[in-house]
Image (cartoon, rainbow, N blue to C red):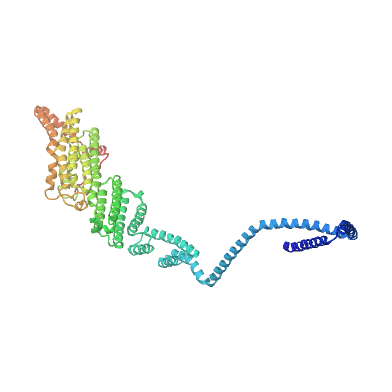
Amino acid sequence: MVADASKPAQTHSSDIFENEDAYVSDLLSYSLERLNKEPELLQGDAERLQRSIQVVAVDHYRAFITAADCVKSVHSEVQAVDAHLACLLDALPALEQGCREFVSGAGQITAGRSTNTQMLACHSQMLELLEVPQLMDTCVRNGNYDETLDLQAFASKLAVIHSDLPIVKALQKEVAGISAGMLSQLLQRLQSSIHLPECLRMIGYLRRMAVFNEREMRVTFLRCREAWFCSVVAELDRSAGAYDFLKRLTDAHRMHLFDVVMQFRAIFADDSSSAEGTGGSAGDGGDTGLLYSWAMHRVSLYLSEVQHGLASITEGSVLASLLEHCMYCAMSLGRVGLDFRGLLAQLFLPPIHDLVANALKHARTVFTLSLSEHKWVALPAVTSESMFYAGAEEGSGPPYSLMEFPPVAIFTNGVLAALNELRPCAPIALRHKLAQALQDTLTQAVAHLIKYHATHTLQDAESILFHLLVRGMSETAVPYLTACFARIYSQPSSASSATSGVGRTESGGGGDATAALLNVGVIVQPLKELLLLRATSESDLGPEEEEEQVLNVENIASPPKNVAKEVMTKSVEADAKHFPSKMYRIV
């Protein structure tokens, strides 16, 4: 448009230059007079043109005003156009960016539309994929682990083939979460009471899941069974008493420990007992000792519980029964290489020793108390017909003649009570210690008699009764008690099998060897010296004094029958506060 406006201006200037050239040519052709008149002529032409212009201006002044207004309006509009063009130039980059974004958005929309079209075409297949996690969860809840593992394998295969698809990634994530829940359920099943077929199924599922290597699988199995074993032990009633608790604990270990070992060996067949003994091969990764270590851990905990419970048992028969139960458990577990009978000896020996030692100590205490409170009153002599228990074999029971001396009878009962506690479970390993304890008890009882004689002033009749008591202690009680102790270790009985792990009782010449441990002569030597001293003093008396003492003793020893019976009953009841008045049978 600007180029079109410049063309008339160039034409007008070229016409002016041509007219000037023609006018100059004309001037050169004029005469001098004409040249002199030329200014006047030019002045007249100019005046004429000026008048014409004025006339035209007067006649067309409106057109000039309109043109001026038009020029002014055009000038303002041109300025506005120029401002708008500047704004347009400023907005062009944003417009260009918007266009580019539009093109990009249009491309995405096109791609999305294409994806939606493809998804619509594969709608049924997509629904099947989206239902896989829900189907897996249903299978896990219902215990259909085979189908669950098949779906997991299908999802893993899709993840390998179409690893770039978002839906496959989301599917794989959900399947991984459900697989973790399935793993938790399988481990919980292993922590419950299940048998070998169920264990094989659970381990098979874990192997198909491929979450553990072989060693981790074995460790996981033992951890789960350990958790279940601990729950079984925790459910045992400890308030029923130490004996009942230990019996139930022993039964639980005998059954369940055997089951777990057999399950482990059946599932992991390469872990044999021979491999455990040699430490396994290098290819096994050194994990063949896992079963052995776990079994030793369980046995150690069991022995610790037994040791803790034995401290609460105060009866020999209960100890014998419990020992037999534990021995049977260890022998039963020996079928799988867990025979721990050799470890039971160190557990049962101290309680047995303490039980007998405490009973002997109690016997000494009661003997001291009964002797200090004893009333020296003669009692009727026991007839030969009542020397033994009714129906008992002659020589198998304690002599009833000791009933003439209540303190000695009570002491004999106390020692027999200790030996009766020892009889059901008499370990050969404690024979020397218990023989020494019995000898110390008898020696201390004899020493107390000597001390009593030295510290108490007795009348003649009381002195005679005291020396009769000493003779009964020396010639009857001490030999009888030592013979009873020897008989425990000389006669084989059912206790022998029960104590097979602690120390078998001896037979044959064992009684002689045991009797040799108790030196009866050393024990009763002070009593014999006391009796010898009494015999010497009696030999120095005159006939009249000796006859008077005999009469006094006969008067004391021969009260009316009913009076004698009442005195004997009161004396025995007063002295036998802690032991029954009748004798215990040792065999």
**Which one is in front, 472 or 369?**
369
Q: From what the image shows, is residue 522 above or below residue 118?
A: above
Instruction: State which quarter of the image contains the N terminus.
Output: bottom right
Circle count: 0
Q: Is residue 177 visible?
A: yes
Q: Position of residue 292 (x, y in %)?
A: 27, 55
Q: From what the image shows, is residue 534 above or below residue 439?
A: above
User: Residue at the front extreme?
Assistant: 32
Q: Is residue 456 visible?
A: no
Q: Position of residue 164 (x, y in %)?
A: 47, 64
Q: Image check: 399 left or right of 49?
A: left
**Which one is in front, 293 or 451?**
293
Q: From what the image shows, is residue 462 above or below residue 318?
A: above
| Rendered residue at 11%/45% (across/down) | 512
Q: From what the image shows, is residue 312 above or below residue 330?
A: above
Q: Position of residue 121 (x, y in %)?
A: 54, 72
- Residue 446 picture quarter: top left
Q: Position of residue 109 (x, y in %)?
A: 58, 66
Q: Image check: 431 left or right of 232?
A: left
Q: Image check: 94 left or right of 394?
A: right
**Which one is in front, 41 or 150?**
41
**Which one is in front, 413 or 442?**
442
